[in-house]
Amino acid sequence: MTTTSGTAKVTLPADNQILITREFDAPRRLVWRAVTEPELIKRWWAGDRGTVTSAEVDLRVGGRWRYVMTANAGFEVAFHGEYREITAPERLVNTEAFEGIPDPDENAALCTATLTEKDGRTYFEVLVEHRNQAGRDAHINSGMEAGMQESYDKLEKVAASLA
């Protein structure tokens, strides 16, 4: 396995957008499983920052999802959303609301994940579209990138372990 630790790239293509790209050393079908199956999500989503205590997934258009973690510092962090489009194993569109802010559903982002495979490796792209620049900037300034790098490193290990 060629390690790709910490290699997710974050760019800002528009004033309300965050684009995350990363290559995983695992086939697309296994990365898809790792991002859609609750027991697998629990193994990677918190990165090294805590423990996932709940991962609920109703994987259908209109279905809802919710992930909860207890951070190492003892506080709880939760996100939820609704699936808008599902084309397994190549495209997943959902809302994402951080429950730690006022009116999380009113301030939810729209996330479009695209998975493509080449030579047994998965190219993963997530476009996060916020309602406005303030929402995007708050997301970027939350420290999300360091946590995301950890989570994606673990996601790669989980997906590869399924082979």
Image (cartoon, grey):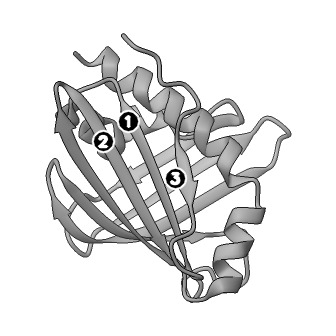
Q: Is residue 8 above or below residue 144?
A: above
Count residues near mark 3 (Cα–Cα under 10 Å), then give few for <14, some for 14-19, many for 20+: many
Q: CA distance from mark 2 to mark 1?
A: 5 Å
Residue drawn at x 25%, y 75% is 62
The residue to which callout 2 is attached is 123
For this rendering, which residue is in front, 130 or 35? Answer: 130
Q: Amino acid at mark 1?
A: Glu
Residue 143 % position (x, y): 76, 53
Q: Among all residues in the image, which is located at the extreme top?
A: 1
SS label for mark 3: strand
For this rendering, which residue is in front, 24 or 155? Answer: 24
Residue 66 % position (x, y): 47, 59
Mark 2 near mark 1, Cβ–Cβ under 8 Å? yes
Choose the circle earlier in sequence order: 2 or 3: 3
Q: Is residue 27 above or below residue 58?
A: above
Residue 79, disc: none
The residue to which callout 1 is attached is 23
Residue 103 % position (x, y): 65, 86
SS label for mark 2: strand
Count residues near mark 2 (Cα–Cα under 10 Å), then give few for <14, some for 14-19, many for 20+: some
The residue to which callout 3 is attached is 67
Mark 2 near mark 3, Cβ–Cβ under 8 Å? no
Question: Which of labels 2 and 3 is toward the front?
Answer: 2
Residue 78 % position (x, y): 62, 58
Q: Amino acid at mark 3?
A: Tyr
Q: CA distance from mark 1 to mark 3?
A: 24 Å
Residue drawn at x 44%, y 70% is 81
